[in-house]
Image (cartoon, helix red, strand yellow):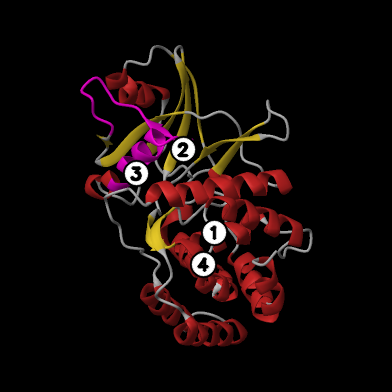
Amino acid sequence: MAVYTSLSLAQVKQLLAPYKLGTIISYAGIADGIENTNYHVKTSIGNYVVTIFEHYNAQQLSYFLQLMCFLRNHGMTVPEPVADSNQQILNLWQAKPVALFKRLPGKSILQPGISHCRQIGTALAQLHQVGKHFSLHRSNPWGFSQIQSIGKAHCDHLDKDDALLLCDELSFQHEHMDHNLPRGVIHADLFRDNALFDSQFKDDQLSGILDFYTACHAPLLFDLAISVNDWCLGDDHYLDLNKAKSLLNAYEQVRPLNDNEKHNWPTMLRTASLRFWLSRLSYQQASRQQFNKEAQLTLDKDPDVLKYLLLKHRENTTFCQSLIYS
């Protein structure tokens, strides 16, 4: 959700003309994220988000948009695609796919508390339960074999200590990854900047889950580990016991983990850390060549944050295991 495609007011008006949204009052680029171009647009009849997709074609986007519609129809607070006057929810702008969504209330929480973690745990489990009935399938672009391949490619570009860490972790994952864990639709990127909370309610109320453009079919435990790694950090930048237990307990109230998932929990925390360490390294490398030369308002996401988590998970297996047991 960065700004790679800059729009003038005249271009915004032209882009939104097929939607019949009244008069444009204001518009502004959204700085969060690193993949798509997003704008907030306020009109005389409502608030919207325009998304210009920089990496996906229309066929690929069909999965994500249908998934969001499916989740909304089953009670999940996710963005609602808006159809134009021809009942199309996906159009083209300068040869790039573009979609419009009703803007959800609330804002992202950068320093979540126990209540925020609990709500995320509940919502993630609900997503996993509802997703069981979604008929479309998308393979995980960051599955086990892809992580191994991408990781080995990065080994040649890191300093000695990081290369040794990465190679050792890839070997560990190869030996310990369990390929028989329960699978289904996962969000795959439920970080703090992809959820909204409405402060009008006591303790803030979860008002939206955003950015489903990495959603896919994968182990549900992987999704849970991704969220815990981001939402449950303490002041020391490692997992806070109370936050983690709150999120995990709330999750299990909706979808209890089986014994095999509990056994694999410490490994999956490492897998999730490794996945985002590698993806951030990849974006960092690509940005030097292309994206940061073009993008406006882009905020870097530091790969070392996930490398640190990976190191700590490797050192604290017993602590990680304890999180999953009451």
> Nearer the viewer's eye, disc 2 or disc 3?
2
The residue pinned by badge 2 equals 76
Q: Residues within 10 Å of mark 4 (few under 14, many from 20)?
A: few
Query: What distance separates the C-alpha of mark 3 from that of mark 1?
Result: 23 Å
Q: Position of residue 254 (x, y in %)?
A: 54, 50
Query: What distance separates the C-alpha of mark 1 from that of mark 4?
Result: 6 Å
User: What kind of residue is marked 2?
Assistant: Met
Along the viewing direction, whichever of 85 and 183 lies nearer the viewer: 183
Q: What is the magenta range?
A: 63-89
The residue pinned by badge 3 equals 67
User: What kind of residue is marked 1?
Assistant: Pro
Along the viewing direction, whichever of 259 and 227 lies nearer the viewer: 259
**Residue 35 visible in image:** no
User: Which badge, 3 or 1, is on the more N-terminal residue?
Assistant: 3
Q: Are marks 1 and 4 in contact (CB under 8 Å)?
A: yes
User: What kind of residue is marked 3?
Assistant: Leu
Question: Which labelled disc corresponds to residue 258?
Answer: 4
User: Which badge, 4 or 3, is on the more N-terminal residue?
Assistant: 3
Q: Residue at x 75, y 62 (%)?
A: 241
Q: Are marks 4 and 3 in contact (CB under 8 Å)?
A: no
Query: What distance separates the C-alpha of mark 4 from that of mark 2?
Result: 24 Å
Query: What distance separates the C-alpha of mark 2 from that of mark 3?
Result: 11 Å
The single residue placed furthest to the right in the displayed view is: 235
User: Which badge, 2 or 3, is on the more N-terminal residue?
Assistant: 3
